[in-house]
Image (tube, rainbow, N blue to C red):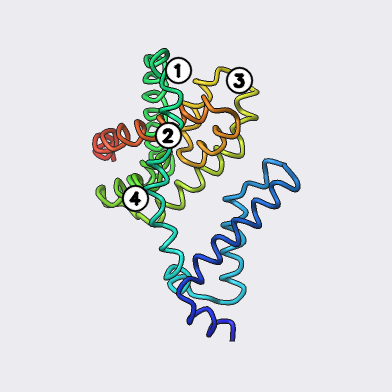
Amino acid sequence: MLNDIVTGSVFFGAFLTVGSYSLALALKKRFGHPIFNPMLIAVLLTVGFLLLFRIPYQTYYEGARYISYLVTPATVSLAIPLYEQLEALKKNYKAILAGIVTGVMSSLLSVLALALIFGLDHKEYVTFLPKSVTSAIGMGISAELGGYSAITVVVIILTGIIGNLFAQPVLRFFKITDPVAVGVALGSSSHAVGTAKAMEIGPVEGAMSSLSITVSGLLTVAGAMIFRNFI
């Protein structure tokens, strides 16, 4: 009976996604521990619901795709906090650019190293190259290079969640407190999900992370075209 109701509801996927995320936010607010990452919990709840009631992914996606349309405009809207922190950008532009370039190169080189260690073929290798950029950009890079776009999205999400979960412990361990450095580190390594954490930390961190998403995406497009030739 549930499957009949689900099949007849055009927006079932959207309702399930929003409901799962709302519950995840409530859990985060209730317990406060970093392990209660809203995106991670929402993904687990959604997947668990689909598996439990044996609902096909295509049925879910028919409604969820309406939410995916918002990914690109949501990414573009991150320019707003950047504009509000324009003076900090002008004052630290050299350090910001150096940090973003270092972040992009670290990401590409780490994927190359892991591909060589684990013997990945070319298609598998290019699938992982855009792991540290937002999905709106990463999917395009993966498709252009001949990778598995669906796997790329999963890797991007996992990268963001890991960055969101471990950002503050890592920053404390290395005693990184400068707001510009924190923002650049999160944005260039963990894209939009990392930026959400940066915005929780502070306005400057959020603005610098927003900038890093865009610039890292552009640099990764260029860098991936070069690195694809290495395997």
User: Residues under labels 4 and 3: Cα distance?
Assistant: 32 Å
Residue appearing at x 62%, y 61% in the figure? 45
- Residue with the mark numbered 3: 174
User: Gap between marks 1 and 4, in whole Å?
Assistant: 31 Å
Q: Residues within 10 Å of mark 3 (few under 14, many from 20)?
A: few
Q: CA distance from mark 1 to mark 3?
A: 23 Å
**4 or 3: tag closer to the N-terminus:** 4
Q: Are marks 4 and 3 in contact (CB under 8 Å)?
A: no
Q: Which is more toward the observer, 84 or 139?
A: 84
The residue indicated by pointer 2 is 80
x, y (%) of residue 13? 50, 68
Q: Are marks 1 and 4 in contact (CB under 8 Å)?
A: no
Residue 21 vs residue 149, the one in the foreground: 21
Q: Nearer the viewer, mark 2 or mark 4?
A: 2
Estimate the spatial distance between the alpha carbons at disc 3 and disc 2, rounded to whole Å.
30 Å
Which of the two discs, 1 and 3, sits closer to the camera? 1
